[in-house]
Image: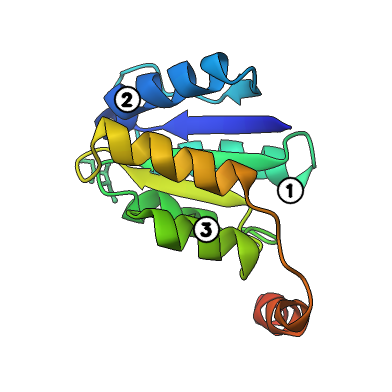
Amino acid sequence: MRIAIGCDHAGYNLRTLVQQYLWENNIEFDDCGCFGEVCDYADIAKLVCKRVQEKKDDFGILICGTGIGMCMSANKMKGIRAALCTDVYSAKCTRAHNDANVLCLGARVLGAGMTREILDVFLNTAFEGGRHVIRIKKMMELES
Ligand code: RB5
């Protein structure tokens, strides 16, 4: 598994924690910035999602203050199913049911413990397929 990560300035501190989690779990990642400087979340979302679109990375993780700006931006990009998760149940269901390929986190919303649990569940839950396939097909058709 390989992951693209990105944050804006408001997400920078939580990004450090996410990097730590990935290192601890031997998960390779590509860092798309920012590096603490003030920036616009849509620019970073574009970089991360492009890597997922091009299959250079399996998943993206995007962090901003609330996670909302990143999530809205990511979902404008073709083939991206980004989910803002603030709890473990949503993280599990968005992988199992929505086959989410980008996880969005809010640095001003989440604590360290919840972030780690969300990462654990998101990265270790498989898409269930079955009845969810047609629903995702219909969702993705909304892009055109
Ligand atoms: C930056 O101040 C903040 O607006 C941004 O990180 C994010 O929360 C937007 O959705």
In the displayed structure image, the side of residue 91 where residue 130 appears, left or right: right
| C-alpha span from label 3 to label 1 | 22 Å
How packed mark 3 is, by other alpha carbons closer than 10 Å (few <14, some 14-19, many 20 or more), is many
- Which is more foreground, mark 3 or mark 1? 3
- In the drawing, what numbered circle is on residue 92? 3
Figure disc tally? 3
Residue 12, numbered label = 2
How far apart are labels 3 and 2 at the CA level?
24 Å
Q: Secondary structure at mark 3?
A: helix
Q: Which residue does the numbered mark 1 point to in the structure image?
A: 53
CA distance for labels 1 and 2: 24 Å
Mark 2 Cα within 10 Å, few/some/many (few <14, many 20+)? many
In the image, is residue 88 above or below residue 113?
A: below
Label 1, secondary structure: give it.
helix
**Left or right: 72 with respect to 67?**
right
Residue at position x 61%, y 58% in the image: 77
- Asked if one can make out residue 66 in the rendered structure from this viewpoint, the answer is yes
Q: Is residue 39 left or right of residue 120?
A: left
User: Residue at 32% across / 54% down in the picture?
Assistant: 86
Give the amino acid type for the residue marked by disc 3 in the picture: Lys
